[in-house]
Amino acid sequence: MIKAARNFAWLLAVLIACVLGTAPTPARADRLNGRFDLNALLTPAMAQERQSLRDRILGRGSRREEVSVARFTSQGGPNFILDESGARPMMRFEGSDEIWVLRPSAGLRGDIYYRNDVGEMVLRMTRLGGITLYTASSPGGLPCAVAGAANRLSLPNHDIQLLLRHFMRESVRAGQAAGTDFEITARAVDPSASDVFGDAATLAVDGIVRMGQSRSGRERLSGLRSIIIASGSGPDARRNGETLMLTVAPRLGAAGRPSSARIMRALS
């Protein structure tokens, strides 16, 4: 009778492993106590299933193509799209045109931290797939949930023939925020990189407009009259008197232009 029960427990362990997926070989039944403790059998399989869930959410492993771009909702905060289909994860908040290129790094307990180009933490993913969003208004973090699939993120199209017109429009917007005449120019624009140059101008003006919404920000903008965009080895933003100097690296795509947060720091 005892032998038959042990055989039954062993068969049950094998069936559980098959149902849950490939799992480490469960403990033999003759090593279990008289109650046939199934926790010893289920724990390895359940741990692997949790890891598989994390792979699906983080977009890794064999199911990457299914979840590499997803829309997320946050509890009490903005919704956003996270795109992990490329070399660098990218993110865009709903209601905003800015695409943020994030830098992932390993954290405690297997967490993954995602930071923007000025080092601010934007997202945190736990090893089990939980996601937390950090914003200026909610520095303690907001829990997030997957809301469905989304389209890949890409920079707005700026045709080289229309780039000058785009600069003129953005110059007017910057001038209104800074309270002065304004000019945006670019040096040696490669037609294949016009999207990066055009978006860099937009992000710079977004930063100027944001600063112009407060009195202290308008004081920091005092004397600023132009933006010059040039190619370089990496993205950068520096103020030189009346001019905001932007460096873009077109070969890096969206990661090759400074974010609005970096631009605001350069103006502060």
Image (spheres, grey):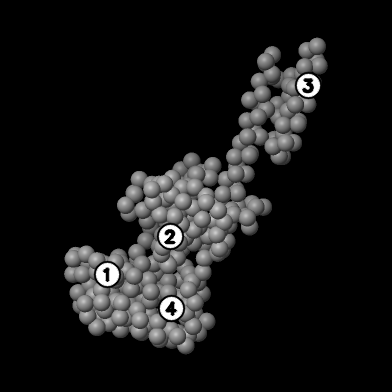
Toward the viewer: 65 or 26? 65
Do the CB atoms of the residues marked 1 and 2 lie less than 8 Å apart?
no
Q: Quadrant of residue 151?
A: bottom right
Q: Mark 4 to mark 3: distance in Å?
A: 69 Å
Local secondary structure at mark 3: helix
Toward the viewer: 247 or 122? 122
Q: For the point 52% across and 51% down, which residue is it?
A: 147
Q: Earlier in the sequence, mark 3 or mark 1?
A: 3
Q: Earlier in the sequence, mark 1 or mark 4?
A: 4
Q: Mark 1 to mark 4: distance in Å?
A: 19 Å
Do the CB atoms of the residues marked 4 and 3 lie less than 8 Å apart?
no
Q: Residues within 10 Å of mark 1 (few under 14, many from 20)?
A: some
Percent across and percent down for residue 87 are 55, 63
Q: Three-letter amino acid code at disc 1?
A: Leu
The quadrant in which the C terminus is found is bottom left
Relative to 156, 219 lies left or right: left
Q: Residues within 10 Å of mark 3 (few under 14, many from 20)?
A: few
Classify 114 as above or below 177: above
Name the residue that disc number 3 marks: 8
Name the residue that disc number 4 marks: 197
Relative to 91, 47 lies left or right: right
Do the CB atoms of the residues marked 1 and 4 lie less than 8 Å apart?
no
Q: Mark 2 to mark 4: distance in Å?
A: 21 Å
Q: For the point 18% across and 66% down, which residue is it?
A: 215
Q: Earlier in the sequence, mark 3 or mark 2?
A: 3
Name the residue that disc number 1 marks: 267
Q: Earlier in the sequence, mark 1 or mark 2?
A: 2
